[in-house]
Image (cartoon, helix red, strand yellow):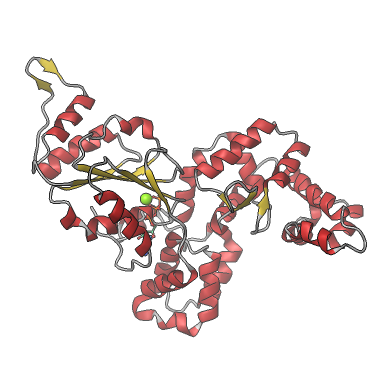
Amino acid sequence: MFQGSANFVGRQYELSLLRERLQQPGVVAISAVSGMGGVGKTELATQYARQHEADYPGGICWLNARESDLAAEILQFALFNMNLEVPQELGAQKLNLEQQVKWFWNNWRPTEGLVLIVLDDVTSLKSCRKLLPKSNRFRILMTTRLRRIDTNFVEISLDVLSAEDALILLTKVLGEQDQRVKQELQVAENLCAWLGYLPLGLELVGRYLVEDPDLSLAEMLQRLKAQQLQDEAINPEDEQLQDTEMTAKRGVKAAFELSWRELNQKTQCVGELLSLFALDVILWEWVEFTSKSLNWVEADVKEAKKQLYKLHLIQSLVDGDSGYKIHPLIREFLKVKQAASEQVDELKRAFAETFIAIAQQIPQSPTQEIIKSVKDAIPHLAEVAQNLTDAVSDENLYWVFN
Ligand SMILES: Nc1ncnc2c1ncn2[C@@H]1O[C@H](COP(=O)(O)OP(=O)(O)OP(=O)(O)O)[C@@H](O)[C@H]1O
Ligand SMILES: [Mg+2]
């Protein structure tokens, strides 16, 4: 149930926050850990549960909220973990599932002491809200990909690892072969950066390297760059993963696919468009400008931004600002989707036009001020020049390269 990774790194601040919040007396505290797929929400909850087992003399109940019927899951827990058969009727009254769950919480054993309930991977609050216990002795810890799942909950928004911790994780996963990191230190750092410091990617690549002692880190990185998100190193077969002690049970692509499926169609289109941008700050006005030339409905694009943000697929830089960033692996994922899309040429053309329009505004001898205002656009313009020249007419190529 909660074994946890032997290679756990970092997250000390988040663990201390959880301890503080979940142990607070008086309030029925629901804490949520939110973040993108593979960032380490389940691992954090696992480590917390392990380290603080003693704080919960009433016991710990771990429930998988995704892909399962939560009521059934709770009743199974009663049966298999507590050896408790929940009655289907009481007196002459038949109990529905919700009532059975309520009965179970009321008859929780032992009858005293704090209880920790972990709801792992909640995708919608609607279905589980009415199944949660109300009594204050139950402390609830939720993990979810949804940002701000409920304003009444205290939320920890989990970010990727720091560059240092990422390197430590890679080193730990390599175990006895950890000299490989030292031998190719610079490459190892680049590898961590390419993976966007995402624990899931780091762990999978580390494990893959262990299996192949002759593969240099440089070759691994080169292969990942060439294969993008299709490489087997970060997408092992499901069965392969089930056989490991890993907390995660999905490869990178499969993990992101779950979020992708929750997006509506227009949001998916916006996602594909976003993959054309360079890996840098994206001003939302550029997305709006481009979508206008694609004749997309403004409200759809607004909704797309909300959805992508809600699911941690884009990150806002400063609250209230219009600058966004995309995680490098999410960008790779969206690129795969974009390449398979029917409207790929149209997207590229509109995207290139946006930045050509910006380039055309730059006068022959630009002032400092103008340079500053277009500075953010330069990486994306470079993207057009390097990768999208097909989408640009000959006369406009001049602007791009100038
Ligand atoms: N701090 C960490 N140190 C070491 N390994 C970690 C850390 N965080 C996560 N991992 C590992 O990375 C993998 C992905 O983490 P985890 O399954 O917790 O992600 P998640 O955020 O729950 O993803 P999902 O949204 O898909 O459920 C796991 O195998 C886990 O063991
Ligand atoms: Mg998880």
The answer to whether residue 178 is left or right of residue 6 is right
* Residue at the far top in the pictured view: 92
> Image quadrant of ligand 1?
bottom left
The x and y percentages for residue 312 are: 50, 48
Can residue 344 be seen in this snapshot?
Answer: no
Residue 191, percent from left and from top: 53, 70
Q: Residue at x 87, y 63 (%)?
A: 367
State left or right for residue 100 relative to residue 216.
left
Screen quadrant of the C terminus: bottom right
Residue furthest out toward the left: 91
Residue 253 placement (x, y as % from top left): 49, 52
User: Residue at coordinates 16% horizontally, 35% vertically from top-left?
Assistant: 105
Residue situated in front as seen by the camera: 96 or 216: 96
Q: How many marks?
A: 0
As drawn, 170 above or below 75: below
Regarding residue 126, the answer to whether it shows in the image is: yes
In the rendered image, the vertical position of residue 74 relative to residue 190, given as above or below: above
Q: Is residue 331 left or right of residue 41?
A: right
Q: Residue at x 40, y 39 (%)?
A: 123
Residue 12's x, y, as percent? 35, 64
Locate residue 78: give its quadrant. Answer: top left
Please name whichever residue, 228 or 68, is drawn nearer the observer in this view of the structure: 68
